[in-house]
Amino acid sequence: MSLAPVRITSPEDPRIADYTSVRERDLTGRDGKFIVEGKVTLDVFLSRSRFKPDSIFLETGRLPVLAPLLENLADDVPVYTADQPVMDQIVGFPIHRGILACGRKDDAAPLSDWLKTDGHSTLVVAIGLSNHDNAGALFRNSAALGGDAIILDETSCDPLYRKSIRVSAGTALWLPFHHGAAADEIFNVLEASGYTLWPLTPGRTATSLYEVEQPEKLAIILGPEGPGLPDELIARGEAIRIPMSNEVDSLNVATSLAIVLSQRLSKTAP
């Protein structure tokens, strides 16, 4: 960081517009932008993210602590600072971490083109995933347990929502993902690309996870908590269940993914 930080003293300063009323504006997409919050995610954002920062916004007292992270920041990325009361007014709530950054999303390629760019052997597919905590957990579990990339359909929430990024421990910033295709298109493209589809379901007629062979190219299909995947989508793959006690009828979607990925990792690791 060769440029001096820019001190902000007024909530009305237009240079800080990307950070105003964060909570209310997070879900709008911010004209193709997104917000990163916290030291862990900022570190990932500046060190290995596939997205580039537009700006950094820090509570004044955080600057000395974060100086090492900002050393290699490009000259065209401004760093704004404000005292805590001013930053709280700008953001719209007490931002105790005092660490924000703004990035810009890239343009989404058609799913078929995106799938050709890398040789993914294990894909995680989310259909109708509406909970941002679960979205973040899917990314973190995938990154930890061998998921190569994630596909989220058009009805799923944005994985670059501020809380999703935080829950993902920043993995949503570097793990490849595609967001926005229709469920039918996703299934068609995966089938045409030679993936074995494993729709997860607690249904008793599904095959136990522990009795199935691991395919070379696998797409693990997850539905929304509560209703789960529609029957017509389950019927398009090999339905897989995780055996569990009769006392509980299902698991959290991120927990289910972790179990399936862990089993796959144990069977395919050299």
Image (spheres, rainbow, N blue to C red):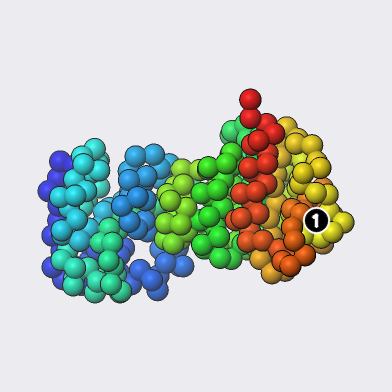
In this orientation, which residue lies closer to the viewer: 74 or 110? 74
Q: Amino acid at mark 1?
A: Ile
Q: Is residue 114 above or below residue 158?
A: above
Q: Position of residue 233 (x, y in %)?
A: 79, 57
Q: Residue at x 63, y 25 (%)?
A: 270
Q: How many marks?
A: 1
- Relative image position of residue 207 (x, y in whole percent): 83, 49
Residue 241, percent from left and from top: 77, 53
Image position, residue 98 (x, y; %):
25, 61
Q: Is residue 246 visible?
A: yes
Which residue occupies 28% across, 67% down?
95
Q: Is residue 114 visible?
A: no
Residue 33 sits in which quadrant? bottom left
Residue that protrudes farthest toward the right in the picture:
205
Quick one: 137 or 120, which is closer to the camera?
137
Looking at the picture, does residue 129 appear above or below residue 24? above
Relative placement, left or right, of 141 versus 6 is right
Task: Identify the image quadrant of the N terminus.
Answer: top left
Q: Specify the quadrant of the image occupied by residue 256.
A: bottom right
Direction from residue 186 to residue 49 in the image, left or right: left
Which of the 4 image quadrants contains residue 192? top right
In this picture, residue 244 sits left or right of residue 150: right
Task: Name the residue at the top extreme.
Answer: 270
Residue at the spot 18% in from the left edge and 72% down from the top edge: 85
Name the residue beneath numbered marker 1: 234
Q: Residues within 10 Å of mark 1 (few under 14, many from 20)?
A: many
Residue at 53 percent across and 42 percent down: it is 144
